[in-house]
Structures are given as structure tokens and as C-alpha cells.
Amino acid sequence: MNALSATAVRPQAAAGPDFAAIKGRQKAAWASGDYAVVGTTLQIVGETLCEAADLCAGERVLDVAAGNGNATLAAARRWCEVTSTDYVPALLERGRERAAAERLHGIDFQEADVEALPFDDASFDAVVSTFGCMFAPNPARVAAEMMRVCKPGGRIAMANWTPDGYIGQLFKTVGRHVPPPAGVSSPALWGTRGLIAELFETQASHIAIEKRQFMFRYRSPEHKLEVFRGYYGPVLKAFAALDADRQHALAEDLAALMNQFNRARNGTLVIPSDYLEIVITRR
């Protein structure tokens, strides 16, 4: 067999995921509904993350995939100079509204993709993200960009849902009805020590990881399903992709998941959801 023939029969390498197309669909999902309705309930995580990162007045802080600005506002309350970024302009506008209402200053809201941050190397004392960067489809690129813009000795602080916790299981449940794009790993892997070590260990002088819980509190399981179905982009889009029968099946599975995790005994809903609080010190 000659070289040309060998080339002709050699299997072609599988094409990698089309990250641009995937991000386009993700962006549309997060822009649908109004994530701020859900996001604002998570404010306590932004506060505790900024404490874990030991943010000090005057430090330059970048919030990536900031959503409606939970970590942004928390850092601004600590008199930091904050740059709040997201690739969904409507979410940045929600952050602006909240900052204005609280008379917080020193915040620059800027549209930006965490996988291609428009900032110079070593621009920030700290880079933070609460349940945001974990949704970008290319983890290696995300980690490289966060490290690049962080100063040596600076901190990267994240709050990431775990695979086994409630939100991780919600992703899994939705994925059974609307499969995720081929070749893209679950965002909940950002809530594992293994992936954090793989992505950051070679450039870190220290990595601190603590398992925490956020408590989802709603009037009832039905109320939470109504809010997530109406405002939480990934769930809203999942229902929109299904016909009526399959929508009913997804709703039933989500209700069963909530009942499994619900610890309330008074008819309301109280669900503890595990996440990792991560603080990486850049070498």
C-alpha cells in the first residue's frame, strides 16, 4: 500500500466541539427569561466568596460571567475597584440597576467573554466568579484567561455547583430530556477537586477548597418550578425545546428531584445545594 492509499483509508480525527456555536446558543438561553429573578436570591454566596478571597479596599477585582452582579456588588461593598463582565448585556444592565439603587461606586460594567477577556496580563488583584465561569464550554480556555489577567500572588475565587448536589442533579435531570452538546462536559465538573487541580495546579502556589451549601427557599416546589421555568434560561429553553407530553415528563422529574432534596416540613421548599468555594493563589 502506498502512502497516498494509507492516507485515504486512515480514519479522520473527529472534529472538536464548535465552541462558537455552542456559546451562541448558551448566550441566547441566558438572555431569555430574566435570570436576575433567580440570581438575586444567591447574593449571600457573593458575600461569603469575597470574604474567603480576603478582598481589601482599593484592590482591582474582576468579576467574570458576573450575571446580575452578586460578587460584583459584594466586592464594591468592600471598597474595591470592580470590573463586572458578562457576555449577556441584559444581565449587566441588571447589575447596573442594583449598583445604582445601592449607591455603589467604582464599578465598570463591560461586555466580555470569559474565554477571551479584553484585559492585559496581570491586570487584577483578584478574579471572582459565582456560578458563572463554570458554564463556559471550554474549561481549559477559561482557566487560562482567568490566570492570565490575575497578578502573581493574586487570587482567583469561585463558587461552583457540585455534581452530586441539587443543582448538579438538576443539570443531569434536564440533560436526560434535552441532551447537552456533544463533546462538552457538564458544568458541574467545575465543582470537583479533580478538575480544579487539573486546570490550575501548575500555576498555583496554593489552592483552598471548602464544600458549602446554599439554601434554596421558595413558597413551595410548584413555586420554584414556576420561577425556574419562567426565568432561569437553561430550564426555560429546555421546556421550549419539548412538545407538551415531554414538557410534562420533565416537569414531573424536576418535581420528584425537588421532593427528594426538600427538607421543609411545613409545605414550603427548602433545598440545600452543595457547592465548592475555591480560592486559588496564583504563583
Image: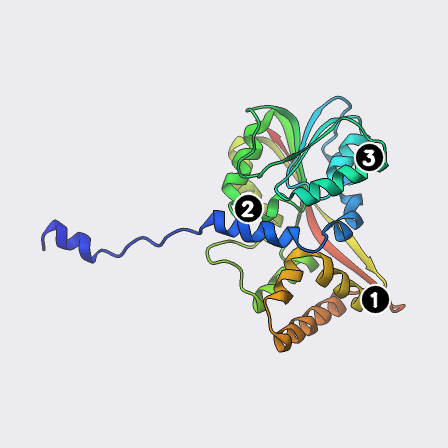
Instruction: Give the left or right position of residue 109, taking residue 148 as reference.
Output: right
Residue sitting at the far left: 2
Query: Residue flagged by tag 1: what amino acid is it?
Result: Ser
Q: Which mark is residue 220?
A: 1
Instruction: Kindly report which numbered mark, 1 or 2, lies closer to the viewer in this rendering.
Output: 1
Image quadrant holding the C terminus, namely top right
Q: Is residue 174 in view from this perspective?
A: yes
Instruction: Kindly report which numbered mark, 1 or 3, lies closer to the viewer in this rendering.
Output: 3
Task: Tell me if label 3 and label 2 are in contact, CB under 8 Å.
Answer: no
Q: Is residue 51 in view from this perspective?
A: no
Q: CA distance from mark 1 to mark 2?
A: 35 Å
Task: Tell me if label 1 and label 2 are in contact, CB under 8 Å.
Answer: no
Choose between 184 and 260: the one closer to the eye: 184
Indicate the position of residue 272 as horizontal and vertical percent values: 77, 57
The answer to whether residue 67 is above or below residue 239 is above
Q: Residue at x 78, y 36 (%)?
A: 73
Image quadrant holding the N terminus, namely bottom left
Mark 1 and mark 2 lie on one chain; the one further toward the N terminus is 2
Query: Residue flagged by tag 3: what amino acid is it?
Result: Ala
Q: Which mark is residue 195?
A: 2
Instruction: Give the left or right position of residue 256, taking residue 193 as reference.
Output: right
Q: Which mark is residue 136?
A: none
Q: Which residue is mark 3?
A: 100
Query: Residue flagged by tag 2: what amino acid is it?
Result: Leu
Indicate the position of residue 20 as horizontal and vertical percent values: 48, 47
Q: CA distance from mark 3 to mark 2?
A: 37 Å
Badge 3, how many Cα within 10 Å: few under 14, some, many 20+?
few
Badge 2, how many Cα within 10 Å: few under 14, some, many 20+?
some
Task: Tell me if label 1 and label 3 are in contact, CB under 8 Å.
Answer: no
Q: Residue at x 62, y 56 (%)?
A: 163
